[in-house]
Amino acid sequence: MGKFKEALKDFQQVKRICPNDPDATRKLKECEKAVQKIRFEEAISVGDTERRSIADSLDYHIIEVEPQYTGARIDGDTITLDFVKQMLEDFKKQRCIHKRYALQIVLQARDLLRAVPSLVDVNVPNGCHFTVCGDVHGQYFDLLNIFELNGLPSEDNPYLFNGDFVDRGSFSLEVILTLFAFKCLYPTGMYLARGNHESKSMNKIYGFEGEVKSKLSDTFVELFAEVFCCLPLAHVINKKVFVVHGGLFSVDGVKLSDIKAIDRFCEPPEEGLMCEILWSDPQPQPGRGPSKRGVGLSFGGDVTKRFLEDNNLDLVVRSHEVKDEGYETMHDGKLITVFSAPNYCDQMGNKGAFIRFNAPDLKPDIVSFSAVPHPDVKPMAYANNFLRMFQ
């Protein structure tokens, strides 16, 4: 969870109980290093009022593309389908695009994302369809398989990816650049929601920060952190289907207008509506309970029913949890979890899934799929050293 200071106290206690345990000693030392690094970063950091936008200081136009570069190219300021297709092929060969084009994609996606509200209304015309995908978690080759099964994103084949694009899987950069590029190419053909892993603290631990530093630069780490704060928190499809990464709330009476009013342009807080949107999980029993994750909460079918009734909605779709078949229906059919990373972390053996909604009835058509092969790069290859000690 990135709470190294709290963890340090626990490791110190374990060390006192088991002073000669080499595993406890090693983990205590790594935790101490992490805390020292945090304290150093806090000491040199500036306050929010002094912090300037990293995106506003960057200009892709001034970055020169070397003559020997043979990868996908963008001519001018417009991202084209030909470029995106060539980029996808380059990524399949484990070749990264030039930093100029990566920067152009991220900056243009940022402009689109920060212009939308925290809750986005999606309109699907009668006779048309809309696809919702759950966590992808850096599994780029499984993302390509989704597009093989369901078609590339377009204005006529729109998608919503419901958070947790990055971390754990070691092709997270390829995933996020692909999704951002399609967002730039088709602004109403690609919708993106924030997940709990679109945050600095999670990226620092679970691999995205290390991957971006390895494949691009430290500057891109800051840029992605800023752009992730622009991602909207929830979507409503045709005023009937509420789509959110985590779940519902610790209090009744939350209205869609309350969600739309959230100032999302920040790192996720540890409590409140924004936190619960990103972290909460459903439970089979009624009422509310503590979260197994230590943040957010667990909520029952009665909570789901009241939220839907209060907002004249029919269904909650959320992600955030691995499921054997890639999905699970709960709460008398009023809540569906969809998870789109099959064989999660190369070890769970689960299927992935996506949901197609056809207007006007919006009946969920769920498609499950299995994992596909990928290059021999292990999950968590770029993760924090401290976390790898627990694998």
Image (cartoon, grey):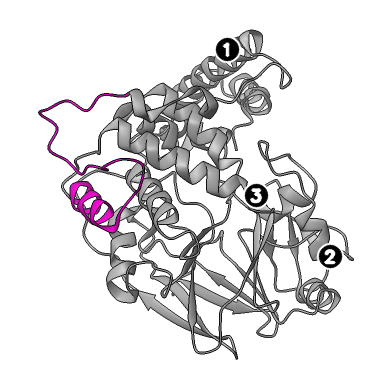
Q: What range of the chain is rendered magenta?
A: 63-92
Q: Which mark is residue 351?
A: none
* Residue 276 vertical position relative to residue 385 in the rendered view, above or below: below
Distance from the alpha carbon under mark 2 to that under mark 1: 42 Å
Please report whichever mark, 3 or 2, sits nearer to the chain's N-terminal start.
Answer: 2
Q: Secondary structure at mark 1?
A: helix
Spot occupied by residue 380 in the image (x, y as percentages of width and height) = 37, 40
**Mark 2 sits on what residue?**
255
For image coordinates 23% across by 56% down, the residue present is 82
Q: Which mark is residue 36?
A: 1
Pair 2/1: label in front: 2
Visible residue check, residue 198: no
Tell me the quarter of the image containing the N terminus: top right
Can you tell which quarter of the image residue 19 is in? top right
Distance from the alpha carbon under mark 3 to that under mark 1: 25 Å
Q: Secondary structure at mark 2?
A: loop
Spot occupied by residue 118 in the image (x, y as percentages of width and height) = 69, 53
Can you tell which quarter of the image residue 238 is in? bottom right
**Mark 3 sits on what residue?**
293
